[in-house]
Amino acid sequence: MLGENHSMEYENPLLTIGLPVYNGERFLKTTIESILNQSFKDFELIIVDNASEDMTEEICKEYAAKDKRIHYHRNPDNIGAAPNYNHAFKLSKGKYFKWAAHDDICAPEFLEKCIEVLEKDSDVVLCHSIAKVVDENGNLLNKKDDLYVKYTNDNIKLKSDSQKPHERFFDLAYIQHSCYQIFGVIRSSILKKTPLIDNYAGADRLLLARLSLFGKFHQIPEDLFFLRRHSEQSININALSIHLYTIWHDTSKKGKIIFPRWRRFHEHIIAINESPLNWPQKLSCYLVIAKILKLYWRGIINDLVIVSIQIIDKLYYILKGRINSNFYPKGDLIFNRIPRLTMNNFNQSHPTGD
């Protein structure tokens, strides 16, 4: 079995699993158990707690006391979703790395089969399996109107295993998908050459697109990974507003003018510029940027409209405030979805990814 010849003290693990969590008491035990029950044993599990306020700390310490492979780190303050994910990787020591959401589940052979592929084929930078979506109770979801179900599994066909970098890049960047591949097993040496998960909405998709410029992905044709769908997930913020989702990623953007779709589109160009591809390969990737623009142009215009609304709203309240010093805007959202430039109290307590 893979991993049996390595030190049982796990001082130099072949794989690091990074588990960022915030207030994850509801599903955390099930996720940790699914990791500890893997047939592949040569890993360290780094749990980075983003200043949870529930029983997360107690659960993590209990498991860390039982298994030397588990290392628990707690942030004194909530640093946001993307920084917490990246902190988990920066603490890692393994040749390979896997992010684990606190509410997802891996079948016992998931790690072993992924590592086996990566050890045999140096052209593969990321290995994952077919994913299925489950509900809060672990039952399979098949509702076609659910975002996870719609953009996961057999509903989406990506050329992420193509020999042509521009095909891999285009499909991962353009086609709507749930980005579940981000929870596959990745070569740490390649991940270090990227900005990791940056502090803007959609950064996970851009990271996948970046990784595809370094090599191909491999999908194990078995249902070994299970995404859990529940009401507390950050995806629900994204469905409401990409501006709110951007603030969820980076709280320093509260009260500021932002252009999230402009930023995301620009990152495609940066990804190609910084890739290891030769110029003919880069040119092929630049040519698909025009197609990607079709996905973003309405959103780019929408960013301008939203900024105009925010500025008008702020000017209105400034003028009202001069007339009445006790006048304050009602709530932090305009039309219940656009963040005000006076926003102060956006709720950051969604657990997944924090």
Image (cartoon, rainbow, N blue to C red):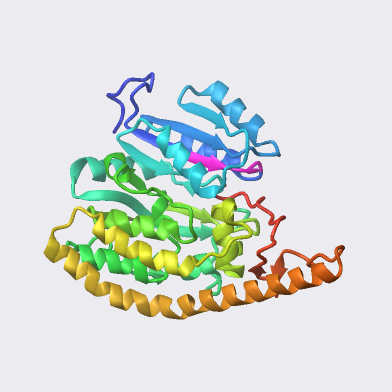
Question: Do we see residue 90 in this rendering?
Answer: yes
Q: Relative to 243, say whether 70 is above or below.
A: above
- Along the line of sight, which residue is nearer the eye, 266 or 53? 266
Residue 340 shown in magenta: no
Q: Position of residue 47 (x, y in %)?
A: 52, 35
Q: Residue at x 36, y 71 (%)?
A: 174
Q: Position of residue 126 (x, y in %)?
A: 30, 50
Farthest residue, direction front: 322
Q: Residue at x 30, y 58 (%)?
A: 271
Tell whether 299 sits left or right of 241.
Answer: left
- Along the line of sight, which residue is nearer the eye, 319 or 309? 319
Question: Quadrant location of residue 30?
Answer: top right
Question: Do we see residue 152 in this rendering?
Answer: no
Question: Quadrant location of residue 307?
Answer: bottom right
Magenta segment boundaries in residue numbering: 19-25
Q: Residue at x 27, y 57 (%)?
A: 212
Question: Quadrant location of residue 118?
Answer: top left
Q: Position of residue 340 (x, y in %)?
A: 67, 66
Q: Relative to 238, say whether 6 is above or below.
A: above
Q: Position of residue 145 (x, y in %)?
A: 55, 74
Residue 22 shown in magenta: yes
